Image (spheres, rainbow, N blue to C red):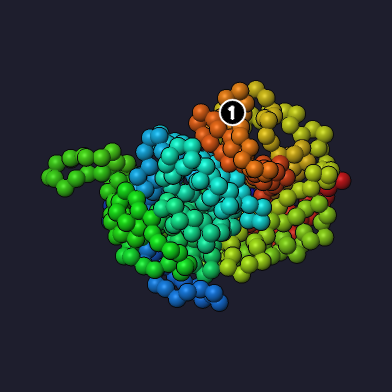
Amino acid sequence: MSERKTIYLCLAHMSEEGIEQKYVKEAFDTNWVVPMGPNVTGFEHDLETFVNDLAPHPSSITSNLSKRVVALSAGTAAVHLALIACGVQAGDEVCVQSFTFCASSHPITYLGAKPVFIDSERETWNMDPELLEKAIIDRKEKTGKYPKAIIPVALYGMPYDCEKIMAIGDKYGIPVIEDAAEGLGSRFNGQVLGTFGRFGVLSFNGNKMITTSGGGALICNGKKAPSTLPLKGEACGAVGVHGAKADANEIMWYATQARDAYPYYEHTAIGYNYRMSNVCAGIGRGQMTVLDAHIAHHKHVQDLYKELLKEVKGVTLHEQPADPRYDSNFWLCAARLDENVKIKGQENAYKEVIKSAVGGAAGVIKAVESAVTDCQPNENVEALRVFMLGKKVECRPVWKPMHKQPVYGGVERGMLSVERLSDNVICQTADKSIAYVNGVSEEIFKVGFCLPAGPCVTDDDVRYIVDCIKEAIL
């Protein structure tokens, strides 16, 4: 019997026909291996066709979208450029979901602005709209200004409440930048995530729904088009009114070093080298042919986990709301482990300092002296991760909330100012960030974990994974 291969969370999966190689070969054959080129243009066109599609939905309002897509070197670059286009500058504040990967918030600090972290609502684990509005009102009272942008995140592909968040942005004239890096193909009310706000961020990292090896894209407004949601008005930003065609052109300009129209290099703004390689875009063009299949597979894996885990006491699969408007791509399947469940090896959890990168992608990590922090998953969750790793299954904790990260002052207690706004809302102010906290993301971080769901994960793999979880539980 051959040795079992490691089952990773989500590995890149090329088309069976090798279509990616065809486009990459064209790039080499034509010696067009630099940023921009025919593959970039073709990939952007394919993405535009996908994101502008409005799936039939019982409650949707018939409308035509006309979004443009700019292919970039990374999803992080997309967030950065969207913030610039929204006029974010040093000293400004930006509301961003706390329960997310660091790429959602770090670009705010690139610009010298300050993240205002918004905690989650319990059902989707995404930005709590009510808490968002309280934060906006409180920031206006305290600073005399509204935040310059709002960044909700499709955590693990789960849609945020697009209707409420867009309505709040509209009410206060604040542009919304949708971080749909994990949510390519997820929909709300039949409409693709990333097409509701002024900008939408996509990622094509090696572990996403489709890959370009590394890369991302920014969904921008093309010609002005009515929304499928009944919003009242439109917010303004630094690149003209919401819906202006200038958005995509402005993003492309900034992404190619912000060069002005002279026969020599003339710069009136600081630009960036953020455009996607023609080679990487060739991979993306081939990947677009399997995107729908990948989305269907992730949903199938989620359904299989749901069936197999329903009898496993103490393990609760994270599911989308019963509201039919929510349609997640289930990029990763997430679950919660009851704190009372005992796992084999739990007594050894956090006893040794980790010395190498953890997870499917190797990398350089900074050495640490302690095996613990002041905010970490419960010992049984860590024990489950270690047990599953021994069974050659990658099983990771959920994202640590950004407001608990040391880089944002999350553990420097002496530097924190805490104000209780209501029975369940705390405003936490540090030198580098502000947070409006209800405790939901911290609670989920302690009990949450992610399971493999990628296109390389088979039904037999899922059954094996669930059997390993059962075996791990004492």
Which quadrant holds residue 362?
top right
Q: Nearer the viewer, residue 353 or 439?
A: 439
Q: Is residue 440 left or right of 161 when viewed as pictured? A: right
Q: Nearer the viewer, residue 424 or 335?
A: 424
Q: Is residue 364 above or below residue 27?
A: above
Outermost residue, left side = 263
**In the foreground, 25 or 308:** 308
Q: In which quarter of the image is residue 100?
A: top right
Direction from residue 42 to residue 56 in the image, left or right: right
> Quadrant of the image for the N terminus?
bottom right
Relative depth, front residue between 237 and 221: 237
Query: Residue 324 appears at what percent x and percent y?
Result: 61, 69
Total numbered circles: 1
Q: Position of residue 412 (x, y in %)?
A: 60, 26
Identify the element where label 1 is drawn: loop
Tell me where residue 236 appears, x and y as whole percent: 35, 53
Q: Can residue 196 be seen in this view?
A: yes
Q: Which residue is drawn at 39% across and 72% down?
A: 64
Is the residue 181 above or below the residue 308 in the image?
above
Disc 1 residue crowd, few under 14, some 14–19, many 20+, Cα 10 Å: some
Q: What residue type is labelled 1?
A: Leu
Residue ID at (48%, 40%): 141
Q: Residue at x 54, y 65 (%)?
A: 188
Q: Using the rendered view, name the quadrant where residue 186 is placed.
A: bottom right
* Residue pointed to by mark 1: 416
Provide residue 311's location: percent of width, then percent of height: 82, 60
Classify 297 as above or below 128.
below
